[in-house]
Image: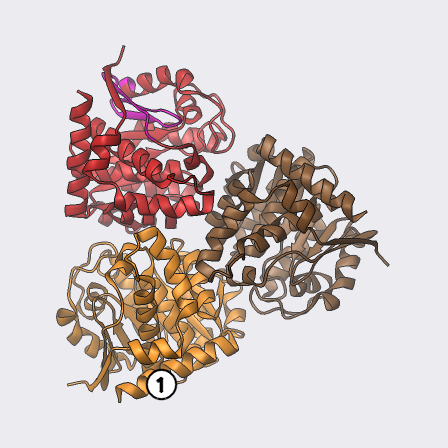
Chain colours: A orange, B brown, C red
């Protein structure tokens, strides 16, 4: 079954490079340039736009909508809701990155409101953020203070209650739709030395959702692909500046051979 | 005549490196850091400022004003108009990048309002954006869905109606003031794999406008210089992350020898 | 006495890499990504957040607060004041970067208001910015038009009047608390070819303030460390794009050996 999911990733990546799907990002100031370059390196086509007057129109031409609350403020939340309502009406998949949920009430409450009213298809966060969405415990800024072991039950609960796919990323990435689960052991510790690698993972999941109906498979595909790119970029153990650039290079380099030879995915039923 | 324009570029580049002209950018969040580094690598001095309280003052010390509607919202539009009015009064050249015109009404209408009331000297866009300004057809986000062949007449019409210089960039760059036209065949396909290369072209045009009175020649100079830098950066066919960094290096490297030996410019009368 | 300060830097750097202090930045759009990566490369943990609803909460978990007025607008100023009041109550050190003070009234007046009401511990600017805070002369955008010789007396005056540490950075960096002063001759001219190196210096000072009580020593430590990283990055005289990336690499590379062998610090009493 794991092999099936690797083939999903292979097909998804080929589709992204064929279709160049438009991924509409309403994201934080810190990673706007980075996320756009991540998506371009992968083969997708990014658009960053947050004005409330235009987010509806963009939903009409986008293949996926990626919402990220990393440098949140009230007017942006309004735009995100308008965008998600509009995307939902048109069947455009919606991915949320609840950056810093648990660290401040504004972020926790906004993320919780998205879970209830945001028509989300996928949520990707670190262990602290996912725990915060399930029960309100705190993180520290954008760092995770918790482990996957601690967050796994919260992820399953969120997935089942909201009928969404939940991804918890960290040393091992975990994905569940409440029925199945995937453990992805790709990636590299250097990813934590570059700002916005979590946001990049979310944007990449958005690109895969734009070309693949199944959001569980698309999320697994995105995380496997990014994790392998993270390993390719780490060859020779570069320092963090060089690693940042090689990560973009590696997203351009990653291909079906890498995916098939390097993927470390384990699929199981959620118990 | 084409040789004259290469010598214009040579002199313009020398002046930029001598004077370090201050280029005031009111630009989008995605490219603020990138555009600043592009201008610094070229030899100009960037300032990014959008607060309505200070844009008038900055017009008093800037050599050029670059407006970019890439992540537009209403308060920024007000600042842009105040800045352009003030720049115009002081004879500071104004360059507009109508990012995404045609993709949303907000962008199309804002760009059209700038054409009417913004005292523009130069507009640089891709084929879809320039077509949208002439007639309202749509693009897709920031990607061009049209060719220069389709957009050329629109560019000439805009240039003649508004007495401005219009540049359409793509595989071949086109510049017209409604009387003359330039075809610039420099550049490299890898430029499309880095976010904000269009915005970078516009910022560079701004720098050349700051040191050269003739906006047609300044626009041609900027696009030739950036195109050649794009070719220098592509030596060895790097992947997109590395290419992004080499593009900055190449803007520092490009010199009169490169300009004279590599420029591929054709000047003609507009028919 | 200079040797003592190098040992301060050695201990501070070790503490940053041990504790990964959370540095809360309310900074400008241009450098948000860059400053975050600077802090990560150094070993600190950045958080960028400006929403007025959450800045108080973040002060409760941050080790330092860095305020930067580089792309100022009114709502951000309100958030900065709320953050600084809250940080002050909890004993969190506050560092201000008065970007462009002197270039526009908005920036000068905002920086002056911070000096009076912002509970600042450290201010770092270029010579023009520091002169503007002491007497209102003008800069040009973010470039300094003045020398350390011109700004030294202003720095001492500000430090004494406001009981803060003032740093003037340039070819030689100068730090004073009104009683002592430090001259730091580390650094490299290429730092001026990358946008946001001044902002990076301020963020790094924030990281050192988070792990060291004495703000004079922390400021000296930060500037020595960054200056040496600037020299390490300049090996082989790279062009500005490559230099930008190597600067991040060098902040990861700099260690006690570099600090001890390369530091060029002179400490004296302020006369």
Identify the residue position indicated by label 1 in the image.
A7
Where, by quadrant of the figure, is residue A134 drawn? bottom left
A107 shown above or below A63 = above
What residue occupies the far left of the structure in this picture?
Answer: A150
Rate crowding at label 1 as few (under 14), some (14 to 19) or many (20 or more) other CA atoms within 10 Å.
some
B39 relative position to C113: left or right: right
C119 relative position to A212: left or right: left
The residue positioned 54% from the left and 62% from the top of the image is B190
User: Can residue C246 be seen at all in this image of the molecule?
Assistant: yes
x%, y% of residue A123?
A: 30, 72
The residue positioned 74% from the left and 46% from the top of the image is B216
A271 shown above or below C251 = below
C137 relative position to B132: left or right: left
Q: Secondary structure at mark 1?
A: helix
B50 relative position to C67: left or right: right
x%, y% of residue A59?
A: 50, 72
Q: Which span is picked out in magenta?
A: C160-186
Q: Chain of mark 1?
A: A
The residue positioned 26% from the left and 82% from the top of the image is A177
Q: Does the magenta run of residues contain C170?
A: yes
Where, by quadrant of the figure, is residue B108 drawn? bottom right
Quadrant housing the C terminus of chain C: top left
The front one of B47 and B15 is B15
């Amino acid at each position: 079954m794991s092999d099936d999911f690797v083939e999903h990733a292979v097909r998804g990546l080929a589709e992204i490079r064929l279709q160049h799907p438009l991924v509409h990002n309403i994201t934080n100031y810190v990673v706007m340039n980075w996320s756009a370059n991540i998506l371009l390196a992968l083969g997708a086509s990014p658009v960053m736009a947050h004005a409330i007057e235009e987010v509806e129109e963009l939903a009409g031409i986008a293949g996926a909508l990626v919402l990220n609350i990393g440098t949140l403020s009230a007017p942006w939340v309004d735009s995100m809701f308008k965008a998600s309502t509009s995307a939902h009406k048109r069947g455009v998949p919606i991915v949320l990155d609840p950056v810093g949920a648990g660290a401040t009430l504004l972020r926790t409450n906004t993320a919780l409101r998205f879970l209830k009213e945001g028509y989300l298809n996928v949520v990707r966060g670190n262990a602290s953020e996912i725990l915060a969405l399930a029960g309100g415990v705190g993180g520290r800024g954008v760092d995770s203070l918790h482990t996957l072991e601690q967050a796994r039950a919260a992820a399953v609960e969120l997935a089942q209650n909201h009928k969404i796919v939940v991804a918890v990323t960290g040393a091992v990435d975990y994905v569940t739709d409440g029925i199945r689960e995937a453990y992805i052991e790709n990636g590299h510790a250097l990813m934590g030395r570059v700002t916005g690698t979590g946001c990049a993972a979310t944007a990449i999941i958005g690109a895969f959702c734009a070309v693949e109906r199944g959001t569980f498979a698309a999320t697994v595909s995105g995380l496997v692909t990014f994790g392998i790119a993270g390993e390719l970029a780490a060859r020779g153990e570069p320092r963090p500046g060089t690693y940042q650039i090689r990560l973009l290079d590696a997203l351009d380099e990653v291909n079906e051979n890498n995916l098939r030879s390097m993927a470390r995915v384990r699929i199981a039923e959620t118990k």
